[in-house]
Image (cartoon, coloured by chain):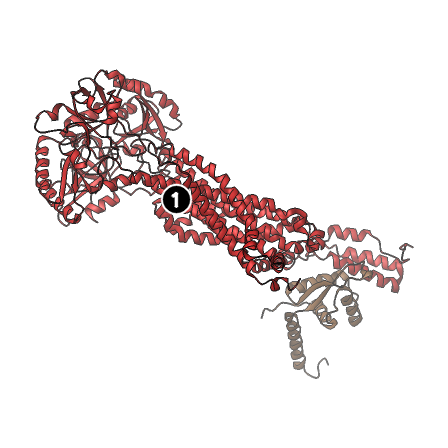
Amino acid sequence: MNRTYLGEFEELVLLTVALLDGGAYGITILEELERQTGRIVSLSAIHATLQRLEEKGFLHSEMGGATAERGGRRKRFFNVTPAGSRALAEIHTTRNHLWNLLPKTGLA
Amino acid sequence: MKKDRDTGKAYPPRWPERLLDWFYPGDSIEEIQGDLQELFQKRLETVGPVQARREYVLTALSFLNPFRKARPFPEPSSTFFNGLFRNQMKMAVRTAWRNRTYTAINVFGLALGMSCCLLIGLYLLEETRYERFWPAGERIYRVNQTNHFEEERTAALVSAPVGPALARTVSGVEAVTRLFSRAGSMLFSGSAGSSRKLFQEEHVTFADSSFFRVFALPLLKGSPNRALAAPGSVVLSESAARRYFGSGNPMGRTLRFENRVDLTVTGVFADLPRASDFNYDFLVDFETLYRVEDPGVADFIRTNWLYNPTQTFARLSPGTDPARIEARMPGLLRQSADERVMKHVRLSLQPLHDLHLYSADMQGSGATGNIRYVRLLAIIAGITLLIACFNFINLSTAYSLRRAREVGVRKVLGAIRLQLGGQFLGEALFQCGVACLLALLMAFLLLPGLNHLAERAFGTEDLFRPGPLLLWLGLFGLTGLLSGAYPALFASGFRPIQSLRGTVHRGRQGGRRLRQGLVIAQFSLSLVLMTVAIGVYRQLDYLRSKPLGFQKEQVVVVPLFGSGGGTSISQGVDQAFRTRMNRFEQAVSGFSRIKGISAASGTPGSGFVRSLVVPEGRTEADNIFASWLSVDYDFLPTMNIPLAAGRNFSKQTGTDHLDAYLINESAVKAFGYPNAAAAVGRPIQRGGEGGQKGTIIGVVRDFHFDPLDQPIDALIIDLRVNRFTGFVVRIAPERMPETLAFLKREWEMLFPERVFEYSFLDEDLNRQYRVQEQLSRLLTSFSALALLISCLGLFGLAAYLTFSRTKEIGIRKVMGAGTVGLVTLLSRDFIRLVLIANLVAGPVSWLLLDRWLADYANRAPLTGWVFALAGAGTLLLAFLTVASQTLRAALSNPVDSLRDL
């Protein structure tokens, strides 16, 4: 499999999109990230990351759901592609594996 | 605090949005602006308007990172395909399938027309490419000679002294070569490893050593500078070399020509391309010609400026104006010091590239092309394509009426006319494309037909050369636009309200007038083609079957010196040869199935040489010419030519071979005698000063010795043995092969050095009408095709119109209409159109035929039945076509058609 490097922030955004399950677009991702991680995140950073993830093939987007509070503009909704879920699962497995190797007396 | 006047809500500043509009690259401006707006609204509630606004501006500005990669715009074609275009494709396929008959007719008709065009185009393209392969061919010219004695006649031949004089005295001429073509026997006596071979060669060409400086013909073997330098040299074509020497090396071998001179092979050239009228296999140095001919004849050729047996080609230096060379010609002719030449002869230059198409009427040109036929064919191709396009337009507009609702709905949904026009044009182009592919397939299948008609040898690969392919693409574009544009304009112009209400037909006649006009045009064109075809065929039949005044059946022609093209001049029958001829005649005439044999200077049918004649009471200055034939004693009885007065040549008098003349009835008139009997016994002289004086001993009935496009000329017959060129042998119709075998055996015993050749006179005569025959075949094929395409269109139209009147027919039937009445009602309109077409086509084809026939002195009368036949045939065909549709409608059960009313 083509191993594409996934940065820390990218991983967070990707996970958040997966978490939001179909309802993911700029604002919801921003809010969810702030809520779950407590970080202050810039909207432009999120947009840039989403676009990068889509280019890497981990996300898929389509337009839809215009509301009045957006001035009638549509949202770009994001979904995790199979490649995206596979990448997440792999990272998860690798980390678990590493955690399991860690001596009990160590960090935990 | 800034608030929206209507909602009372705060709003963010406008300018960051503008900024993004201007500077944010790529395709994500919508969601970014939307997100910014939404975020602002949320922050408004939590942090208040001032803070929200500040955050808004900062976030917006943070998007303007110059290093940000733009989200690419989606591929335009993907939405194109997914959206409108996909829908239109779907509609195109569905409607094409729903109206399969119509689609099939449309595509098939168009494909037929296009394949015709493609094939004719293929032929025409090759016609215009003749002689184009010669290096520097645009600087090569042929010298033509126009004689002006009784009438103007242009020949592609000039006298032998002209060439050298031109090369010597006119500047701007790089090189000149003369070509003298002559038939003759060629013998290879064999050597170790190869056997003796004797062939009669039709095109042995004598050329000056400068030949290769005019025609840069690449030599496979030998050097162009030396190949024709030495007397007795011959340069062979590759295929001729193979014929005589097989795979062996021909260089330095010896061939014996006419059993008179030995020729040494000094070079071999590659066979010429197909697109050339030059047909020489042997190039012999010009000086050798004088050794082949008898000394007297050779001297005549060498010095006479009036006798023109050679084609002469000049290569001008670059930038030389041919008109300047032509202006020097009268001065050149003054070298002849011959009054008649200076007064009556004009020399002109013809470009090499024009030879093939523009010298059909010239004597001795050997051109196989004719610009008249090229134009005619181009017109026929155009007509066929036009008829096919008319079909397409007719059927497309008719069937687009069925789609009026679709157009209406599309318009209501916001389609503009341009889009709809594009849709219909696109569908037309699509059908055209399919037709194009089909046309290519048809052209491939019809290629043997073309080869048969045009006597060519095209192969499949010729269809895929750049020229024909370009033509093919051009045809696609042309027919697509020609036949697609109007229907597109028509269908896209339906008014939505009318079309949705279903009243398009009434609203604007549905293009009925145009359709009728096109049908009339189609049938007029087909009818003209058909009538002309019948007329030409009748004339051809007339020419072939007209009694000629002599016996042409069961007459075998045996040439003394070999048949063949080129310039045939007197070969000189000397006393020894005459004795052998007499022995042959005696040996042969004893055979029971040989009814007669005689020698002559020519055979009737292809015309004779003309000679100056001085009848009684006239002078040389009167310039009276007559065709001149020399025959043996038995010629008249052998050919069954009756006498009108006087007697035939007789051996008894002992002086007939010196001073006796026969003339024909036309000559009696031309020389001014009241009747045949009055001419007998009168003095006459053939030739000018010092000519042969003699007496008219008899008058023969007129017979057609010229081709039938000419009237019967005055004829003078004498008994000059040395002009004889062959025997005519009349044989019994039974067991001909045995008779011919007998002739061959006797021939080989008496003339072992000559190949026995023979032909049948009637076949020779019919061969003269090859051009007319080709024209007739061509016209017949294409008029049939044009009619077929027209009927296809009529069929489609009748099917459509009958279908759209199904309910009317049902109601009429319920009301008691009969089948005959209904068929009449439905067919009447169509038949009326074909009748009008008849009225248009009649006079046009009459004019055309009349003009064509004007070239013929003997013409089949233009009778009404030619037109009646074409008209009635077309009418019947049109009626059957329409009736096949209307009858079905008239016979259908009204319950079926009225059920869903």
Residue ID at (89%, 55%) = B4
Please indicate, yes or no, whether residue B253 appears anywhere in the rendered image.
no
From the image, tell me which residue sits under label 1.
Answer: B778
Please indicate, yes or no, whether residue B885 appears anywhere in the rendered image.
yes
The C terminus of chain B, quarter of image: bottom right
Q: Based on the displayed image, in which of its 4 quarters is residue B606 positioned?
A: top left
- A49 vs B595, nearest the viewer: B595
- A84 vs B771, nearest the viewer: B771
Q: Chain of mark 1?
A: B
User: How many residues crowd around disc 1 within 10 Å: few (fewer than 14), some, or many (20 or more)?
Assistant: some
Colour in which the image shows chain B: red
Residue A48 vertical position relative to residue B316 in the rendered view, above or below: below
Residue B847 vertical position relative to residue B520 in the rendered view, above or below: above
Residue B43 vertical position relative to residue B546 in the rendered view, above or below: below
State the image coordinates of residue B139 (x, y, percent, origin top left): 37, 31
Colour brown, chain: A
- Residue at the extreme bottom of the image, as rendered: A104
Total marks drawn? 1
Is residue B167 rendered to the left or right of residue B195? right
The N terminus of chain B, quarter of image: bottom right
- Residue at the extreme front of the image, as rendered: B816
Residue B815 vertical position relative to residue B839 in the rendered view, above or below: below
State the image coordinates of residue B217 (x, y, percent, origin top left): 30, 38
Is residue B180 rendered to the left or right of residue B860? left
State the image coordinates of residue B391 (x, y, percent, origin top left): 53, 49
Under mark 1, the amino acid is: Leu
State the image coordinates of residue B320 (x, y, percent, origin top left): 39, 26
Is residue B770 rendered to the left or right of residue A101? left
Residue ID at (78%, 51%) = B18
Q: Secondary structure at mark 1?
A: helix
